[in-house]
Image (spheres, helix red, strand yellow):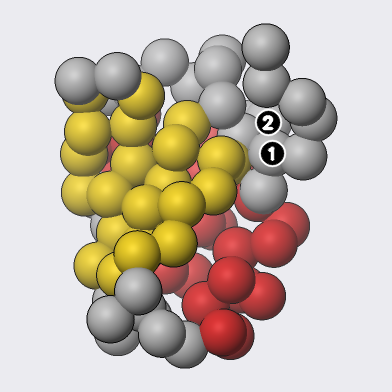
Amino acid sequence: MVMQQVFVKFNNAEQVRSFVNMIGTLDANFDMGSGRRMVDAKSLLGIFALDLTQPQKLSCNSDDASVMEKITPYLYTERLV
């Protein structure tokens, strides 16, 4: 199994809810956070405990290429400093 890491950013609470609902249907483990603070990305409360004003690292254990396609709308594509 391959660990894939990307950065995601949410614009509002509805986007977070939509994201959690979508990945909840996938058969893969997801962790999200920055620095030492990591949470289960399938946990709505866990995600809201993070600093959502900043991009968050999303780690996924899956070989399924469609997983990355499904999270594309939430990807943070600007350059990180």
Where is the N terminus found, in terms of image quarters? bottom left
Q: Which residue sits at x=72%, y=57%? A: 73
Residue kind at label 2, given as amino acid type: Asn
In whole angstroms, how far apart are the C-alphas of marks 2 and 1?
Answer: 11 Å
> Which of the two marks, 2 or 1, is nearer to us in this view?
1
> In the figure, 77 relative to 22: above or below?
above
Q: Which residue sits at x=56%, y=14%? A: 53
How crowded pointer 1 is (Cα within 10 Å; few <14, some 14-19, many 20+) is rated as: some
Where is the C terminus found, in terms of image quarters? top right
| Circle nearer the N terminus (2, 1) | 2
Q: Is residue 10 visible?
A: no
Residue 27 horizontal side relative to residue 16, left or right: left
Q: Nearer the viewer, residue 8 or 11?
A: 8
Q: Position of residue 5 (x, y in %)?
A: 46, 52
Residue 59 horizontal side relative to residue 38, left or right: right
Q: Position of residue 40 (x, y in %)?
A: 21, 49
Residue kind at label 1, given as amino acid type: Tyr
- Report which residue position mark 1 lands on: 76
Q: Position of residue 13 (x, y in %)?
A: 54, 35
Q: How many marks?
A: 2
Residue 11: give its label: 2
> In the figure, 10 relative to 44: above or below?
above
How crowded pointer 2 is (Cα within 10 Å; few <14, some 14-19, many 20+) is rated as: few
Residue with the most extreme front position: 2
